[in-house]
Amino acid sequence: MILQLEDVFITMASEHAIQVKRQHTSSAGDSSLVCIVHYDRCRDTELRHLSSEQFRSICNAVEIRQVQNVPGTRLDVICRSIPSEFDDSVHGCHRWCFKNFTNVSRLSVPTVSTERSATRVTRPMVHSMLMRFKHLGKLLIQ
């Protein structure tokens, strides 16, 4: 990865200029990164490193997308390609791909009907259900 510092001068209200260093990243020398949420229609060329927090955001988006009924919002192909273990030296992402994949704010989480009232399923509940299914699968295999 090539880091380039750029001098930026900012004039404050008191008319005193201060110098700020901005850091720019370039993927020119870093061809080892792979966009883990890549869209075919992505036009970005710069791959960025992911943080563990960004990887968790992607995993949360997978949980929400996989409970959707419409294939266009489920994005099964992308969800299946996301690794289960995070490796910051290999896993990266285009900014556009990350923003589009993790934008699940418009997606609804299914509700579970009870006799008394409809209860909204929260993200932690979805996660615990997925963990139960994963555990059940291990028990069935043994």
Image (cartoon, grey):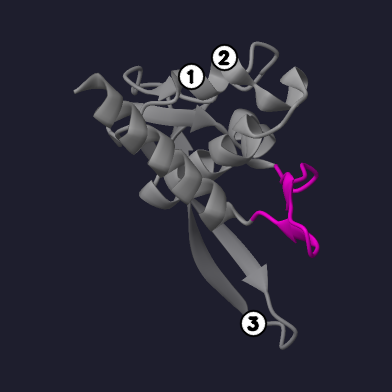
Mark 2 secondary-structure assignment: helix
Residue that numbered label 3 is attached to: 16
- What's the magenta bit mostly, secondary-structure-wise? loop
Nearer the camera: disc 2 or disc 3: 2
Image quarter where the N terminus lies is top left
Mark-to-mark CA distance, 2 and 3: 53 Å
Tell me where residue 120 appears, x and y as whole percent: 72, 57
Q: Is residue 22 left or right of residue 105?
A: left
> Amino acid under label 2?
Val
Instruction: Give the answer, above or below, for where 109 lies relative to 30.
Output: below
Mark-to-mark CA distance, 3 and 1: 53 Å
The answer to whether residue 114 shows anywhere in this view is yes
> Amino acid under label 1?
Arg
The answer to whether residue 38 shows anywhere in this view is no
Depth check, front residue: 9 or 36: 36
Q: Quadrant of residue 62?
A: top right
Q: Residue furthest front?
A: 115
Residue that numbered label 1 is attached to: 80
